[in-house]
Amino acid sequence: MFSKIGLAFLLLVIFSNLYADSEVVFRVAPYTLKHTNGQLILNFQLNSDKNLIIEDSNKSSKPSDYKKEHQYQIELGIADCDTIKEIRIVEAATKSILFSKSLPRKLCPYGKSTDDFVFGFISDSQLNRDQHENVAKLIAYHHSIEPLQFLINGGDIVQNGNRESEWLEYFKGGKAYLMDIPQIAAVGNHDYRGTIGLGLPKLFKQFLRWEGAENYGNLFFDFPGFQLVVFNSNFIRMTTLESVRLFGWLETKMQEAQKMKKPLILATHFPVYSSSLNKITSQSVIILQNFLVPLLEKYKTPLVLSGHTHMYERSLKDGVNYIVAGPAGGKPNTPSANNPYVKYFDTNARTFTKIKYSNKVFTIETYNEQNILLDNLIINL
């Protein structure tokens, strides 16, 4: 029987070998996005032109020509209740399997399943590929012992959002989990860096959204037992009218969740409360504290997830829990402000947070890159 370290090492060897092969075929190895309508979207780029068949749970597409370096987004449909979705990419001429994965089963509608619902949270994967790889292996290890339905990235996916080379490094750094766990991403200020105009940054939209996605990247998910909103807090990239409209949209979602008696979780890049503020953060925080906090407290939002400060921090104010992730790839930060609501704080940790929902209880565990449990929280709804 493997120890945790032994199992983690074995997984690392397997992932390294798999990805070494995939890099020959793929410029961007296949990964999936969690669509708001419940289905998954398969994304990839090739290193050379190929004629491929896409097999989705034993349903095969017709052979089609796929061009190198083109970003492909393939809708996989919605899996049947409590089934595992099998995905394969097959070279038509040779029948060689270029990619094959089993993705987490789809949960039944609320009331028909009592199984635990588990997902993960990281943020700020930017800048340092080696450090991102360490966190990626940690995520892969936890996924191997308790499959994650999806992973939320709180934004600042890359350092400079307009540089495709940095996006390619992000996909290589996150290889241990990106091919296995559906992604849900918030947009950070660095994801806008180098871009011009309003709306979503071009490359963020290309890699982490889909055709028809909301213009500013806001997402809403209705899961068994709870709901999730991914909210764009880059207000300096919006008109005042657009910011007001987005807060109106958010309150509508909160009202609907309250009527359905479902808790609603919010994920956004900028933190509401933290011990580190800079010029950019301060502008966004003022808006969040003036307009978001009253909504969170009015509708009894149990949990807010964010990043940006590069320090792990958990706060509590008036029944709302705020978790700020340590950086998955960015450089750790030091305190520069007073947070009167802080409950736990770590300036050095790169973190992965695992969140379990079961029977109206959220169980939250945060680990550092050495897989040491730093912080835990139970929220009874």
Image (cartoon, grey):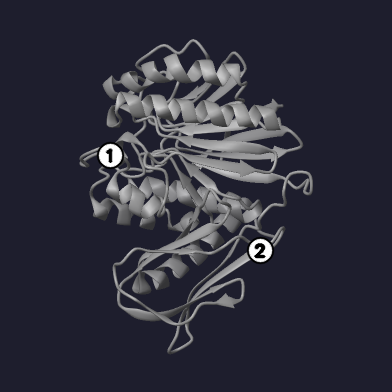
Percent of width and height locating residue 130:
36, 49
**Residue hosting label 2:** 84
Q: Earlier in the sequence, mark 2 or mark 1?
A: 2
Callout 1 amino acid: Tyr
Instruction: Find disc 1 in the rendering and name its residue.
Output: 192
Q: Position of residue 37 (x, y in %)?
A: 56, 51
Residue at 39%, 64% in the rendered image: 44
Mark 2 is on which residue type? Ile
At x 49%, y 10%, the residue is 340
Q: Residue at x 45, y 69 (%)?
A: 17
Whether residues under marks 2 and 1 lie with C-beta atoms below 8 angstroms apart, the answer is no
Q: Above or below — where is 242 with respect to 44?
A: above
Marks 2 and 1 sit apart, C-alpha to C-alpha, by 36 Å
Q: Is residue 143 left or right of residue 369?
A: right
Position in image of residue 377 (x %, y %): 64, 28
Q: Quadrant of the C terminus?
A: top right
Taking the image as drawn, is residue 152 in sight? yes
Q: Quadrant of residue 71?
A: bottom left
Q: Position of residue 70 (x, y in %)?
A: 31, 67
Q: Name the residue nearer the viewer: 335 or 200.
A: 200
